[in-house]
Amino acid sequence: MNDSLRTFLRHPAGTVGLAILAVVCVAAALAPILYPGSPWDMVGAPLRGPGTLGSFLGTDTMGRDIASGVMHGARVSLMIGIASTLAALLVGVTLGAIAGFAGETIDLLIVRFIEIFQTIPNFVLAILLVAILTPSIWTIILAIGLVSWPPLARLTRIQVKSIAAREFVQAARCQGQGSLSILLRHVIPNAISPIIVTGSMTVASAILIEAALSFMGLGDPNYMSWGYMIGAGRTVIRQAWWASVFPGLAILLTAVAINLIGEALNDALNPKISRS
Amino acid sequence: MKRRGFNKMLLGAGVALPALNLFRDGVAYAQGPSGGLTAIINPEPPVLVLPLNQQIPTGTIGGKIYESLLDYDFDLKPRPQLAESWEISEDGLTYTFHLVKNAKWHDGKPFTSADVVFSCNVMLKEVHPRARGVFERCESITAPDDYTVVFKLKSPFGPFLLAFETSSAPMAPKHIYEGTDYRKNPTNDTPIGTGPFKLKEWQRGSYIHLVANEDYYLKGQPALTEIFYKIIPDGASRSVAMESGEAQLSQFADIEPFDVPRLASMPNLKMTTKGYEFFSPVLWYEMNLRKKPFDDLRFRKAVRHLLDPKFIVERINFGLGKPATGPIASTTRFYDPNVTIYKTDVAAATALLDEMGLKPGANGVRATIRFLVVPFGEMWTRLGEYFRQALKQGGIEVVLDTTDPAGFAEKVSNWDFETTSNMLYQNGDPALGVARSYISSNIRKGVMFTNTEGYSNPEVDDLFARAAVLTSDKERAALYSKVQKILVDDLPVLWMTEQQFPTIHDARLENLIDSAIGVNGTFGRTRWA
């Protein structure tokens, strides 16, 4: 792992990504300290530009502080990104591992099941799920998790399939280890690196889907999120560009940072690159 | 999702939305003073047959195709439309209308008193709830000759003459509808009215094209040769269409409030809030009085003290509107300003909550209530957000719930909500548009725009009932003053603002807004300067 860590840190894009993500995480952590009130509080005059007295990034149409919204929004975005990715990983890795390790019939069934999900456009399915289940933070996590797992499942399946055919796995079998023990102790640990890489990218895409849902008015109305801020600020973009630009930048930077980290992880976890 | 995948999704989201609004698909819209007018319509009406549907966009376009017997000036005084004159008997029970003699339906058949009797006595009673309420008060509706109609009332009804506004009682052709299933009539796609414009083409999702009715019964009308109603679902695109001159007329909530000052100040455009007197909508926060703690007057008063109607006018409506003092809008008849005034006062609110025993808990929260956000656009979302922040000052936590339009109507009409907001038209008279929200006989589960809050007060019922059947305006005013005082003290709903709608139009358009129904009028006299 030390080799991997070194490769990661030597990767310039990775360190930049890590730095940006750290800033976002710090913003999320400090939000309740720097802006103890709710981001929904109408603290100042409406549509004040950035830098005017008391409002670092300006205010929106209702006089809400954009800076407070961006910082509190970081909590929501990261929370939804991570929680829905965990949900997707849970479903995806489990189903993928079973498909890759169990017999042909089960494999076929699971692959067909995955294909059902893959034929429906992700975002449309997410909109549908949230609209039916009524928007709340939990239904959004569920919806994003449900549309994000198929690629993870396919990746896990193919990784497991290839690892399971290796000689060390056959050796374990010959020693009489049970299937579940082989899967958990030998196959998954050796198959996990590309899954971690894809999982990190899934976080970024989850944040984007959440932003898009909130933008369309399908966010949880009780949480200030970046997508909501852009959606609410979009209509006044000609009078107050700051109301949508800053949350937009926040989404952009976070998504880019996570992708850079993912790329660096990819290199770091690739034994051929990390040990060269 | 692969990175490339969501890059595509981002691009898609950015590009697809504006692309939806490119309507220049080879159709030459009327541009400027060429005799035609291009107006905005939003949302797209489900149908144009006004007798069957009275939603706002149907009323706007249907008002060019269909007509009723009367029209009203800005003070809600009746003027001739399909009826050229009328008499009322001394006892206020018999109304005799004399119809214009040369009016024709768009299919060439003459318009006669038989059509009026069929519309008012048969068809509207079945398909139009508001008209049913009025015409059920008639003992008989008869036609002594082809151009005379006599309405005999069971008992006097003060606002009877206001019931003949186009959307309230649109005339339907007897020869088309008699004996058919009205809602499934094959001609519903090509509406047939008597108005100055007739439907030429309806390109779903794109535009509705009306052309002048050359056989119109009023000489020299219509002055315009055609009207294109362009369907533009996106608010920002509607502003741009007005700004660029692509459209020359917008009405109701077409232009988002924050864009109104900018468009109004443009030299080639004019803005007016006149022409909505008949509707005079009042906006309020509604609480389900069947549930705790809303059944407690002290709670309602506390919430009222926490809210500031001025904030809504200035920040949410960008100046379009004025604070409402009670149930009757100041722009209609029988408004009385002498009622209890509730100041925005957090201390008064917390005192009332303390008195109720709603003490702040560990986190400063006295009560948690739910608010159903109205799913009809930006303004309604902001109203919910404001409600939550305003009540927070008094220690009341508000959880917002969102839903779609169908779900909203379902929840509110079935009393499955705690608090929400709403806006109702007054329809020219308290008996037509105000009483319905407060009288206990109108507590009707499953029906929208009734007494959904569940307010019931025998004295209020009695006052509204008596005021409706009087014919003297002075006597009616006295009863309505009394009922306004009682209601404002009782707070069945929390009235916030009298909404104003901006009509923005090309400065060269003349005679556009000349009645109390403004943009829903016929536009017969509208012309280019």
Image (spheres, grey):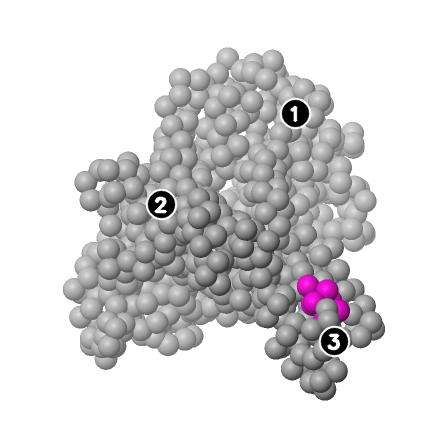
Circle 1 Cα neighbour tier, 10 Å, few/some/many (<14 / 14–19 / ≥20): few
For the point 73% across and 29% down, which residue is it? B200
Q: Amino acid at mark 2?
A: Ile
Task: Give the distance between the C-alpha atoms of the residues marked 1 and 3, in whole angstroms.
Answer: 67 Å
Q: Chain of mark 2?
A: B
Residue B437 visible in the shown view: no
For the point 50% across and 50% down, which residue is it? A264
Kindly state the secondary structure of the residue where label 2 is placed.
helix
In the depicted view, which residue is nearer to us: A85 or B44?
A85
Task: Give the distance between the C-alpha atoms of the residues marked 2 and 3, in whole angstroms.
Answer: 69 Å
Magenta stretch: residue A125 in it?
A: no
Position of residue A180 measured from the top left corner of the image (x, y, whole percent): 67, 81
Disc 1 versus disc 3: nearer the observer: 3
Q: Amino acid at mark 3?
A: Gln
Q: Chain of mark 3?
A: A
- Residue occupied by mark 1: B24
Kindly state the secondary structure of the residue where label 3 is placed.
helix
Marks 2,1: beta carbons within 8 A: no
On the same chain, marks 2 and 3? The answer is no
Residue A170 is tagged as 3
User: Which residue range is magenta in the image?
Assistant: A159-165
Which of the two labelled residues, at mark 2 and mark 1, occupies the earlier sequence position? 1
Residue B316 is tagged as 2
Q: Chain of mark 1?
A: B
Name, please, the residue furthest toward the right. Answer: A105
- Indicate whether A261 appears above or below B370: above
